[in-house]
Image (tube, rainbow, N blue to C red):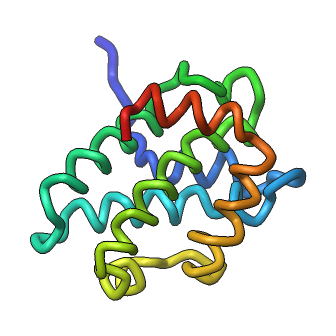
Amino acid sequence: MNTFKNLDYSELLDNNTSDYNGPHQELITNSRHIFDLMVKVLDDPDLPNAYRSKLLSVIGYFILPKDLYPEEEFGAIGYVDDLMAAIFVLKQIEQSNLTTKLNIYWSGVINLEELLNVHFDNLRIDYMELFNELIEYLDI
C-alpha cells in the first residue's frame, strides 16, 4: 500500500529557497510569503472575479514543476518566473485600490511596497525576455 505525505507547498517553497544566496536573494527567500499572500488574497470575498482567475492561473503556474524557467534545472533562481507572474498580478490588484487588503495579508520580512515596485522592476530588467514570454504564456 502506498502512502502519500501531505506536503504543504509553502513549506516546500521555504525549504527550497530559505538558504538561497545569489541574485535577487531577498525576493527568492520570500517566495513562501509571496505564495501565501496570493492564497490569502484569493480567499478574500471582496476580490473581483477578474483578479481571482488571474491569481488561480499564477498559483497553478507556481506549482507547475516544468515551467518556462524550471527550478529543477536552475535551482532556487528558477522561481524568478513564478515570482514575476505573482508580483505582476499582485501589482494589478494593488492598483485597483485593494492595497489595504494586500498589506493585511502580507507576512514577509521585506516591505510590500518595495517588493511590488523595486524588486519587481529589478526582476523585469534582469529577465525582460523571460517576463515577456511569461505574460504571453499566462495571458495575464
**x, y percent for residue 3:** 33, 23
Q: In the displayed structure, would residue 106 be above or below residue 56?
A: below
Quadrant where the image shows the C terminus? top left
Q: In the displayed structure, would residue 97 be above or below residue 60?
A: below
**x, y percent for residue 44:** 18, 70
Q: Which residue is at the front of the view, 62 or 134?
A: 134
Quadrant where the image shows the N terminus? top left
Residue placed at 57% from the left, 50% from the top? 83
Q: Which residue is at the front of the view, 57 or 127?
A: 127
**x, y percent for residue 84:** 58, 49
**x, y percent for residue 126:** 80, 46
Q: In the displayed structure, would residue 138 be above or below residue 104?
A: above
Residue 27 lies left or right of residue 66; in this view the side is right
Name the residue furthest right. 22
Residue 67 image-quadrant placement: top right
Residue 50 lies left or right of residue 81; in this view the side is left
Residue placed at 67% from the left, 30% from the top? 71
Residue placed at 65% from the left, 78% from the top? 114
Q: In the displayed structure, would residue 39 be above or below residue 105?
A: above
The tally of labels here is 0
Residue placed at 19% from the left, 64% from the top? 43
